[in-house]
Amino acid sequence: MSGDLVQATEAIRLHRQGYERLRHGIDLLAITKARNDYGMACLAWIDLCVSKAESDDQHDPVWAARSFERGRPVFTGGKPRDVQVREAWLDYQSARIGADLETIGRAREAWRVAFVAWLQDLMV
């Protein structure tokens, strides 16, 4: 799955570059297509992140939570959606450490919803 995540990340980079090149032009159809492609690449990346997290939870949720503690901070911005997705992420990590798989699943879904809402704000 990590190869899929790398490919999804690369797709985001390529679509973002295409969108940025067109954004200030006058071809509205091309701009709309590029923006749509960029947004769909971002959604695919979010789905892969959530799928990988779910797979990690099935294997060992405590290990998964602790492995992320050693990583870089997630969503450090101060915008309201940044705060919401960061809080959902932290709630999810807490659930992974001490809860059953059903509670972990609900927390993961709340994180996914916040993540998608963050993307929607980004695309506006």
Image (cartoon, rainbow, N blue to C red):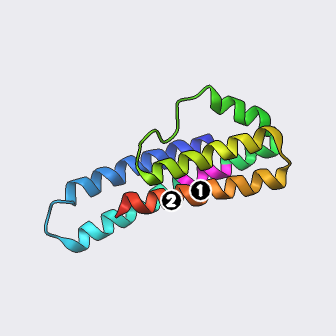
Residue found at x 48% / y 42%: 75
Residue found at x 16% / y 60%: 24
**Relative to the observer, which residue lies in front, 54 or 65?**
65
Packing grade of label 1 (10 A; few <14, some 14-19, many >=20) is some
Single out the residue that lies furthest toward the top: 70
Q: Is residue 115 magenta?
A: no
Percent x, y of residue 69: 64, 29
Specify the amino acid type for callout 1.
Answer: Asp
Residue found at x 52% / y 42%: 6
- Judged from the image, the secondary structure of the residue bearing numbered disc 2 is helix
Magenta part of the chain: 46-51
Quadrant in the rendering for residue 61? top right
Q: Is residue 109 above or below residue 72?
A: below
Percent x, y of residue 124: 34, 64
**Mark 2 lies on residue:** 43
Principal SS element in the magenta part?
Answer: helix
**Relative to the observer, which residue lies in front, 86 or 10?**
86
Specify the amino acid type for callout 2.
Answer: Leu
Percent x, y of residue 111: 62, 53
**Mark 1 lies on residue:** 47
- Judged from the image, the secondary structure of the residue bearing numbered disc 1 is helix
